[in-house]
Amino acid sequence: MIRGRITGRIWSSKHIETLPNGALLEVTLDTGGSLIALDPLGCAEGEAVLVTQGSVAAGYFTKSKAPIDALIIGSIDEQG
Amino acid sequence: MIRGRITGRIWSSKHIETLPNGALLEVTLDTGGSLIALDPLGCAEGEAVLVTQGSVAAGYFTKSKAPIDALIIGSIDEQG
Amino acid sequence: MIRGRITGRIWSSKHIETLPNGALLEVTLDTGGSLIALDPLGCAEGEAVLVTQGSVAAGYFTKSKAPIDALIIGSIDEQG
Amino acid sequence: MIRGRITGRIWSSKHIETLPNGALLEVTLDTGGSLIALDPLGCAEGEAVLVTQGSVAAGYFTKSKAPIDALIIGSIDEQG
Amino acid sequence: MIRGRITGRIWSSKHIETLPNGALLEVTLDTGGSLIALDPLGCAEGEAVLVTQGSVAAGYFTKSKAPIDALIIGSIDEQG
């Protein structure tokens, strides 16, 4: 998995019908670069998150074949 | 997923028989580089799109095993 | 597989319910960069490890579809 | 998918028994780098091709589990 | 697939139980970098090899779900 921080959100009105519900969040990676991940947890901008990639991201969705290759699987605990 | 913008289209008259119908579009990625993605949505040159990669891209095609590792899953809403 | 060395650990109190038990360890790769891998072996900070990536990492977990794309599969023997 | 051009061919007399028949061609990628892809189409040196990667490349072979992670799926039409 | 040359071997006394038998060889890639691949062919140090990556590498092992994401599938013929 890779670490990153939420830095934005995108909307897609025109999309394929198998796209699951959930926010499409921009995650800036600690190792550089960024990606768009689906968020089933309700994370907020600025939150540090853990992202899984590839077919295991789609495996989270059991009803249909979700076209998702990046999923936020957890929020990383940060010391206050 | 990754963000990009459509910058071209390719044609392949000689191809394997399991290639699905649909435009093969060149997508220039926001993070650099480019790839060729299948477009089931009818996007236009210059449009900002969201691309999924790997075996989940092929999972969109249910009739046969499609040899597709990059699929446009949505058009990204842009403020006018 | 890729080689690396354990350089940290993260905790995630808020996570999806299918995340398996096990430590989430930061592995700094010999080829540069770092990732977070699930550790089923109980490795210690500083230990040299072998990491597998992608859907085969999730295949280790047989009870449910684990959203894991990086797994420590062995500790690398080092000469004393 | 990625674009490239055929720049060579390799032979492997000693190989695992599940390697399918077909030429193993070196493809130099338009975005830099190169890889070895299996060619089911009979492409020639210098030809521009479209390559798919990952498990979908292996899915083209239906008789056995082919250990193929890169497959030429089409020749790209070029203006004369 | 990618080309490389065998430049070392690692041993892992402490490993997960589903790791298959076979040498874990370090392969230095022609395009730069290195990885650890499982070798079912008995290759020697200095030998030029072809490596497949991802879930198709694990598919070679039929008895159990092998946590292998890189497999040597052939030795590359070199002119004497």
Image: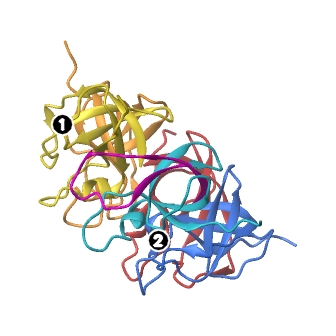
Chain colours: A cyan, B yellow, C blue, D orange, E red
User: Foreground residue, C70 or D7?
Assistant: C70
Residue at screen point 24% across, 68% down: A64
Residue at screen point 32% across, 41% down: D51
What residue is shown with label 2? C67
- Secondary structure under tag 1 reads loop
Question: Is residue C35 depicted above or below B3 in this figure?
Answer: below
Image quadrant where residue B64 sits: bottom left
Residues marked 2 and 1 touching at CB (< 8 Å): no
Residue at screen point 25% across, 53% down: D21
Question: Is residue E6 depicted above or below E13 in this figure?
Answer: above
Q: Is residue B43 left or right of residue E22?
A: left
User: Foreground residue, D33 or E40?
Assistant: D33
User: Foreground residue, E35 or A70?
Assistant: A70
Q: Which quadrant is the C terminus of chain D positioned in? A: top left
Residue at mark 1: chain: B
- Binning the other alpha carbons within 10 Å of mark 1 as few (below 14), some (14 to 19) or many (20 upward) gives few
Q: Which residues are magenta?
A: A1-27
| Residue B42 numbered mark, or none | 1
Please state the horizontal and vertical placement of residue D37, each as a whole percent of the image: 35, 44
Query: What kind of residue is marked 1?
Result: Gly
Image quadrant where residue D16 sits: bottom left
Q: Is residue A11 left or right of residue A1?
A: left
Q: Is residue D10 left or right of residue C2?
A: left
CA separation in Å, label 2 and label 1: 32 Å
- Secondary structure under tag 2 reads loop
Please state the horizontal and vertical placement of residue B17, each as a whole percent of the image: 12, 46
Q: Is residue D43 left or right of residue C80?
A: left
Task: Single out the residue that lies furthest toward the top.
Answer: D80
Please state the horizontal and vertical placement of residue B55, each as a whole percent of the image: 32, 57
